[in-house]
């Protein structure tokens, strides 16, 4: 059986006291095992990162830039190979896997502009003979803890800026689909990144505990569920680290009566069921305003019938399996209990049958869902779309704003005034206007509000430069040039 290694100081390390099982979600069979790091193994990786830090920090911006250009070239050339890895361990269809890599590449491209991003400021003659300038310097060793749902993109969100800023990195990917992180580390090494600058350690709570508490780790980046994000933020901050921890989501898509019905229905289906709903930016609540509700529910229902669910390697598949059998069963439980709570089950994904032992589940549509129901309150993270009916635009905004999450939201309308008001009124970190999944491009930053974010900086883009560096201000004064023993060759002006 293939054994997925750690990457520590440029070496593959496979020996371990414990191993995790890595499944192919499309078949339900274990195909690999991954070494799970002990506390001692994580300590070894931290020491490697610490040892590599002085030389990497001293590496010129020009040299760093050249490495990032090479990484971009290699990722582009080998996109299909990486996409196949994603599909085999996560289950998403190949088109989704390739799209994930493309979005990750945006962050490598942003990091390639590090010479511009790391520029400081200067003020001359703030006082007589005194100048002031600012610089940004790396924080040190950075821990990046990433989720299972985007095993290539989210690591690239973090490590791109962290490395560009001169830090060394310990990447701890999800043990459910860890191979992509090893692949990425190998590409960085091929591009010329020195040993020890990017290390990959696999593990569970034992490994994470060391990263959160070790004094050699200066910053922690995390993406995952809200309960764990809250814990990560608290524990790492208690140990003196700066932390950005992105949590869960319950993204609402508001559809006004004047919206283009076909556009809205198409968007709802793709945003709710793409990647089996295992996306932190997936639309999970469809807010139907006023008279459009019945037609919108029917339009969505009619499109669901045509969705092809199957192995991600099948070009005809539009949705693959869920990540594990346990997660599939948990998602199905929300559909099972919806009717008892008063919702209408328009389409029950549990009714769809699949051959083989894969972790497949059909898509579900719930109507007449209300706050207080489990299907509304919980982050389901699967192919279940809930419809909440409200009477007015104001009701829709109130619904979104009262939800504990504030990750992303969208509005579908033809009315520019309504769209502008929504942008102003709604309490969420990312907003789409006739765009169901408003993930910012790499030159902006990604992050939500409320229980979707712990910390005060968003992921990637300009916020990441501020997070992965510390500001330093230097005030200088030199002797009066008129007293200098060096002939400056021009009249002295005081």
Image (cartoon, rainbow, N blue to C red):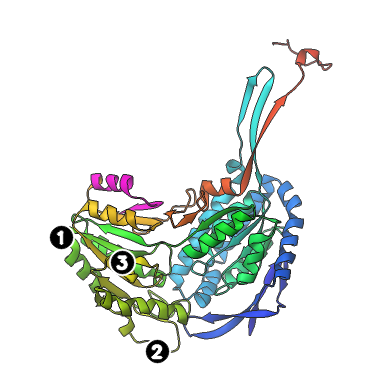
In this rendering, the answer to whether 214 lies above or below 420 is below
Mark 1 highlights which residue?
A: 291
Q: Position of residue 296 (x, y in %)?
A: 21, 65
Q: Which of the two discs, 2 and 3, sits closer to the camera?
A: 3
Q: Position of residue 138 (x, y in %)?
A: 66, 47
- Residue 424 can be seen, yes or no: yes
Mark 2 highlights which residue?
A: 355
In this rendering, the answer to whether 367 lies above or below 348 is above
Mark 1 and mark 3 in contact (Cβ < 8 Å)? no
Q: Which of the two discs, 3 and 1, sits closer to the camera?
A: 3
Q: Position of residue 447 (x, y in %)?
A: 46, 54
Secondary structure of the residue carrying tag 1 is helix
Bounds of the magenta segment: 417-435
- In the rendered image, residue 421 lying in the magenta stretch gets the answer yes
The residue depicted at 51 percent of the width and 81 percent of the height is 24
The residue depicted at 38 percent of the width and 80 percent of the height is 361
Residue 371 in the figure: left or right of residue 222:
left
Mark 3 highlights which residue?
A: 372
Secondary structure of the residue carrying tag 3 is loop
The residue depicted at 52 percent of the width and 74 percent of the height is 84
Q: Earlier in the sequence, mark 3 or mark 1?
A: 1
Quadrant (top left, top right, bottom left, bottom right) of the N terminus: bottom right
Q: Earlier in the sequence, mark 2 or mark 3?
A: 2
């Amino acid at each position: 059986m293939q054994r997925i290694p750690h990457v520590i100081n440029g070496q593959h390390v496979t020996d371990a006291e414990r191993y995790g099982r890595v499944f192919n979600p499309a078949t339900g069979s274990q195909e690999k095992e991954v070494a799970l790091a002990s506390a001692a193994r994580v300590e070894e990786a931290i020491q490697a990162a610490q040892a590599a830090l002085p030389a990497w920090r001293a590496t010129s911006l020009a040299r760093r830039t050249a490495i990032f250009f090479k990484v971009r070239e290699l990722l582009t050339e080998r996109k299909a190979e990486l996409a196949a890895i994603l599909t085999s361990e996560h289950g998403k269809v190949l088109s989704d896997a390739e799209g994930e890599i493309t979005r990750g590449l945006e962050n490598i491209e942003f990091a390639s502009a590090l010479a511009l991003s790391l520029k400081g400021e200067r003020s001359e003659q703030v006082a007589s003979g005194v100048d002031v300038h600012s610089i940004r310097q790396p924080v040190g060793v950075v821990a990046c803890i990433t989720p299972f749902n985007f095993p290539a993109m989210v690591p690239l969100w973090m490590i791109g800026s962290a490395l560009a800023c001169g830090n060394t990195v310990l990447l701890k990917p999800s043990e459910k689909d860890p191979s992509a992180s090893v692949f990425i580390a190998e590409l960085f090494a091929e591009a010329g990144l020195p040993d020890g600058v990017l290390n990959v350690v696999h593990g569970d709570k034992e490994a994470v505990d060391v990263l959160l508490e070790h004094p050699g780790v200066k910053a922690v980046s995390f993406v995952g569920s809200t309960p764990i994000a809250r814990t990560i933020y608290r524990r790492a901050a208690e140990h003196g680290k700066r932390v950005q921890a992105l949590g869960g989501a319950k993204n609402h898509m508001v559809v006004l009566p004047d919206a283009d019905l076909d556009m809205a229905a198409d968007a709802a289906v793709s945003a709710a069921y793409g990647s089996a709903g295992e996306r932190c930016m997936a639309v999970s609540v469809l807010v139907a305003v006023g008279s459009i509700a019945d037609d919108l529910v029917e339009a969505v229902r009619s499109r669901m019938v045509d969705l092809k669910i199957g192995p991600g390697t099948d070009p005809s598949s539009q949705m693959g399996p869920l990540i594990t059998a346990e997660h599939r069963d948990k998602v199905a439980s929300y559909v099972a209990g919806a009717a008892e709570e008063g919702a209408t089950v328009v389409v029950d994904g549990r009714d769809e049958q699949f051959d083989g032992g894969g972790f497949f589940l059909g898509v579900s549509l719930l109507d007449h869902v209300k706050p207080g129901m489990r299907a509304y309150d919980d982050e389901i993270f699967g192919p279940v779309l809930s419809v909440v009916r409200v009477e007015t635009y104001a009701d829709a905004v109130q619904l979104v704003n009262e939800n504990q999450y504030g990750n992303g939201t969208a509005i579908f309308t033809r009315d520019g005034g309504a769209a502008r008001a929504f942008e102003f009124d709604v309490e969420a970190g990312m907003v789409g206007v006739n765009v169901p999944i408003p993930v910012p491009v790499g030159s902006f930053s990604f992050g939500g509000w409320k229980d979707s974010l712990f910390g005060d900086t968003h992921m990637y883009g300009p916020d990441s430069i501020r997070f992965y560096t510390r500001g330093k201000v230097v005030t200088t004064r030199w002797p009066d040039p008129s007293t200098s023993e060096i002939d400056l060759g021009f009249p002295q002006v005081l």
